[in-house]
Image (spheres, helix red, strand yellow):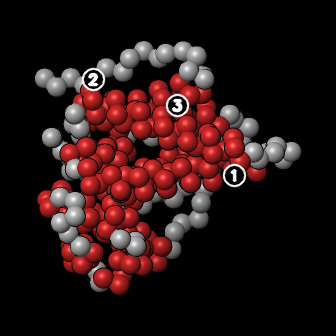
Amino acid sequence: MPTASLSTAATGAPDAAPGAPPRSRRELNKAATRQAITHAAMDLLRTRGPGNFTVEDIAEAAGISRRTFFNYFSSTEVAIASVTHGFLDKALQKFRLRPAGEPILESARAALVELADPMTVAPMAELYSLGQANPSLSRSELEAWDHCTVEIIDAARERFAENPGTGIDELYLRALAGSVISCGKAAMDVWFARCGGDLSPASLSVLRQLLIDSMSLLGSGFASQPPATPSPDRH
């Protein structure tokens, strides 16, 4: 399976939102440490495979102590799952900047469109691809998607709170989040079937567009079918 070297921008902590106060040196150092742990975990996952390295191995590779590792993550699985969280955090940043009165699913689609660099989906795509070849990674994948569901519920609840007089229906929030996650998984499945886990920019562009199209389908109530997203040219 072709792989790509993932950039710091793709795997690091989310950038500060526009207009937010600059992060302190302490916050920047914490973000850098978290990023180093994630990089180390993914490097070990690629070279040794799932279940063949420990917290101590990750800590040594990241240049930190075991105790410091546990200040950030509770297990190797959670550290690996944080790769997917990074993409979601970037998307939610964009979502929260959308107009408060905009329909939620329109905001979700617009947030994905604004993530113009296809490399933003690279860490999530790589972890998904590794999981297809290693079923034991399914636990990390489930943890990542569960985290995503909770984060989407929280973001949607915040949106409703910004509109006075709008009631918050828990069934709606949870059904919405579950539907978004299901559409995201469907996009990942279709991408892998078409591209075989290729992490080239062209392939990642296909994945990004599939994610956008899945939100369009959900937003329209599946009333229409968008044009098929082409597979990348592998010549």
Callout 3 secondary element: helix
**Residue bearing the label numbered 1:** 158
Report the front residue among 219 and 137: 137
* Separation of marks 3 and 2 at Cα, in angstroms: 19 Å
Disc 3 or 1, which lies upstream in sequence?
Answer: 1
How crowded pointer 1 is (Cα within 10 Å; few <14, some 14-19, many 20+) is rated as: some
**Residue bearing the label numbered 2:** 231
Query: Which image quarter: residue 137?
Result: bottom left
Q: Quadrant of the N terminus?
A: top left
**Residue located 31% across and 45% down the image:** 128
Report the front residue among 98 and 64: 64
- Picture layout, residue 209 above or below residue 115: above
Callout 1 secondary element: helix
Three-letter code for the amino acid on which mark 1 is drawn: Glu
Name the disc covering residue 215, or none: 3
Q: In which quarter of the image is the C terminus?
A: top left
Percent position of residue 46, x then y = 18, 56
**Residue located 22% across and 64% down the image:** 51
Of all residues shown, which one is farthest toward the right? 165
Three-letter code for the amino acid on which mark 3 is drawn: Met
